[in-house]
């Protein structure tokens, strides 16, 4: 069945529309949006499909969808603003700003460690409920009390659920705002970016697409580190108002492709966008420079800049200069400062996660690789 693709695509970026269309034609999508900016201007803005599983509600221009760990991009850029303003220091211990965090051998963990998933608190020794995860005071107290999982040794372990709490509490201590409010007032609002780390108006729930849930998968071996990680937090009702309105800055955001591409255009343009300097060029470059490389029990071999994943032999991005991050279910945020291109992709079909490699992302990434090569000539 042919799916009607809405929006526009600059002819120079036609491979992106072709890849987006092919994913629908092969039955890989329910609803999705894809966008690119180039030199700060929108050049691709596409959406298609359905916003509900029953396929009665079309995906609209302003439909939003949960983007899981792509939320970490918003959290990271918020921390980069604090660094650039001199409110925090990259190699300062987190405990300088949040003294309680020093418990359990975490006194030497730095802001840089937290940005590179080496903070030593990737989960909870005693699992928490999703409702507890949504309670900022409770969960930050649990993070502070949690012993360092590796006795203070720096080791990359993806902080899937917890990435935003050490960083976010530091932000709150130096700025007095929690991450969602800071991001909304300092970045999303001024940028006119429809990316929400937490919703503030229940009426906005009507814009959310319904997810097609992931296929059940095999649990990791009982007693393994990976099992400890994935069972640290119970699932809960992640479609509820509690979920959508709470500060969980590792994975609670909602957005669409346009909003993700708009946000990441700050980094693609090395900190200065449309005449406004958001970040210094030096800090923007540092964010795309390798800060840590290692084997993670969750992600396997991975290279990190300041909060972003980098291209490496173990995981190749669409070009050597492209970097970014993605989320469970397929959302993707990419930026390439060599060409000034940023990409945002946000789908609602989470069931595709049963594939070892998401074929939608493989096709979109291949198309982007060709586009970047053409722009670089």
Image (cartoon, rainbow, N blue to C red):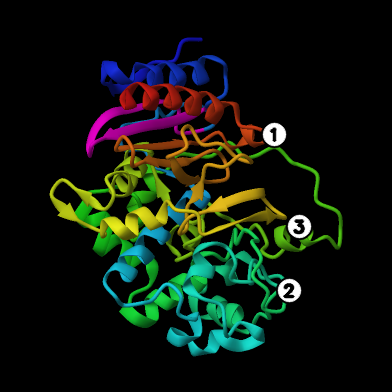
Stretch in magenta: 30-52
* Residue 330 placement (x, y as % from top left): 54, 38
The 10 Å Cα crowd at callout 2, few under 14, some 14 to 19, many 20 or more, is some
Number of disc labels: 3
Q: From the image, which quarter does the C terminus lie in?
A: top left
Q: Does dot 2 land on a helix, a strand or a loop?
A: loop
Q: Residue at x 57, y 40 (%)?
A: 329
Which mark lies nearer to you, 1 or 2? 1
Give the mark, 3 or 2, whose residue is nearer the N terminus: 2
* Residue bearing the label numbered 2: 125
Distance in Å between CA atoms under marks 3 and 1: 17 Å
Q: Earlier in the sequence, mark 1 or mark 2?
A: 2
Q: Which residue is mark 3?
A: 226
Check residue 356 in the rendering and tell me which mark sits there, or answer none: 1
Q: Nearer the viewer, residue 282 or 70?
A: 282
Image quadrant of residue 215?
Answer: top right
**How far, Cα to Cα, is label 3 from label 2?**
12 Å
């Amino acid at each position: 069945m042919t799916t009607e693709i809405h929006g526009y695509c600059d002819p120079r970026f036609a491979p992106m529309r072709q890849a987006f269309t092919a994913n629908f034609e092969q039955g890989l999508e329910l609803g999705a949006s894809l966008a690119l900016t180039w030199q700060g201007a929108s050049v691709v803005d596409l959406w298609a499909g359905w916003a509900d599983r029953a396929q009665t509600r079309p995906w609209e221009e302003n439909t939003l969808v949960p983007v899981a760990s792509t939320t970490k991009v918003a959290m990271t850029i918020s921390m980069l603003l604090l660094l650039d303003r001199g409110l925090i220091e990259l190699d300062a211990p987190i405990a300088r700003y949040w003294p309680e965090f020093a418990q359990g051998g975490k006194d030497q963990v730095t802001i840089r460690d937290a940005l590179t998933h080496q903070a030593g608190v990737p989960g909870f020794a005693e699992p928490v409920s999703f409702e507890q995860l949504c309670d900022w005071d409770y969960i930050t107290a649990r993070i502070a009390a949690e012993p360092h999982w590796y006795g203070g040794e720096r080791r990359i372990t993806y902080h899937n659920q917890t990435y935003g709490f050490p960083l976010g509490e530091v932000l709150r201590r130096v700025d007095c705002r929690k991450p969602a409010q800071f991001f909304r007032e300092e970045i999303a609002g001024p940028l006119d970016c429809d990316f929400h780390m937490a919703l503030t108006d229940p009426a906005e729930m009507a814009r959310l697409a319904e997810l097609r849930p992931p296929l059940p998968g095999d649990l990791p071996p009982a007693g393994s580190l990976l099992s400890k990680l994935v069972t640290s937090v119970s699932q809960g009702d992640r479609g509820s108002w509690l979920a959508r309105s709470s500060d969980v800055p590792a994975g609670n955001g909602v957005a669409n492709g346009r909003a993700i591409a708009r946000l990441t255009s700050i980094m693609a343009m090395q900190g200065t966008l449309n005449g406004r300097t958001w970040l210094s060029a030096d800090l923007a470059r540092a964010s795309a420079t390798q800060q840590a490389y290692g084997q993670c029990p969750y992600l396997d071999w991975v290279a990190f800049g300041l909060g972003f994943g980098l291209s490496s032999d173990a995981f190749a991005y669409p070009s050597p200069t492209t970097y970014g991050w993605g989320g469970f279910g397929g959302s993707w945020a990419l930026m390439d400062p060599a060409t000034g291109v940023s990409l945002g992709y946000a789908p609602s079909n989470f069931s595709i996660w049963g594939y070892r490699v998401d074929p939608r992302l493989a096709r979109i990434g291949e198309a982007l690789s060709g586009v970047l090569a053409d722009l670089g000539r």
